[in-house]
Amino acid sequence: MPATTAAPVLSVILVCKNPGPRLHAALASVWEQHQIHPEIIVIDGASTDGSREWLTSQRARLATLISEPDAGHYHAMNRGVALATGEWLLFLGADDRLVGDRVLSESLIWMNKTEAGIAVGEIAYHDGRISRLRSDVNPCARNFVPSQGTFYRRSLFAENDAFDTSLAVMAAYEFNVRLWKNRVRFKPIPLRIAACGTGGVSDSGSWRSYREEITVRHRYFSFGRCLVWDAFTVVRYVRKKIARSFSRH
């Protein structure tokens, strides 16, 4: 009887399109992990900047590589989820890197201690901001989970459906609120998971990300509860626009 291969405990899903050399550091931070060999799935949107060729040269170090046109970031993430076999999933971008060469094995120690569906660590942005799961979670306020520091049980996607691809920027927020409304437990873990860039779509300051945040809020909460937080969202948008205007001068 042929030997069976045990399913990986953790799948790391990296989605990219024309990421440039920063992709090398992101994957290197996964390859250098000790005491754990995660399943690495890369979904590349048919890059034309040389990344596709570089990924092909590294094919033996990846469990799955798909490089072809897709319908957007979250469509690519859903493809990664469908291909993953790990019990836990972690999503990284090309501008992110894991902090330390044992962060995944240390995270699994904490995840093995919980029955929660989601384990959330801390991330640090290059501009000095820190994001983590607060003890007083208010999903109505804004996205409350830092994606690059969050481990999801893969079963959640089968039980609660995938990312809503009609939302180009805030599908992760919508998914997290959906899980919260479905009483899935979020568990903080006391570890910094990733260092992240600030050039992502959700951090760009475009009105679309704020508009989609408001859309998600009204999908799950009453108009009266949303009203104040909608106002704060508009204020945050205006404040960022002003800050960016000053930074250009």
Image (tube, rainbow, N blue to C red):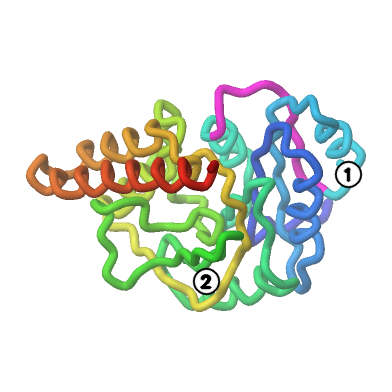
Q: Secondary structure at mark 2?
A: helix
Dot label at residue 136: none
Between 158 and 65, which is closer to the camera in this rendering?
A: 65
**Closer to the N terminus: mark 2 or mark 1?**
1
- Residues rendered magenta in the picture: 62-73
Amino acid at dot 2:
Met
Q: Residue at x 73, y 53 (%)?
A: 26
Q: Which residue is mark 1?
A: 58
| Residue 8 on the magenta segment | no
Q: Which residue is mark 2?
A: 111
Give the percent coordinates (x, y) of residue 125: 56, 60
Judge by depth and name the residue closer to the eye, 214 or 55.
214
Rendered residue at 39%/31% (across/down): 208
Q: Residue furthest left?
A: 224
Residue 141 at x, y percent in the picture: 26, 53
Residue 99 percent across, percent down from the top left: 67, 68
- Three-letter amino acid code of the residue under disc 1: Gln
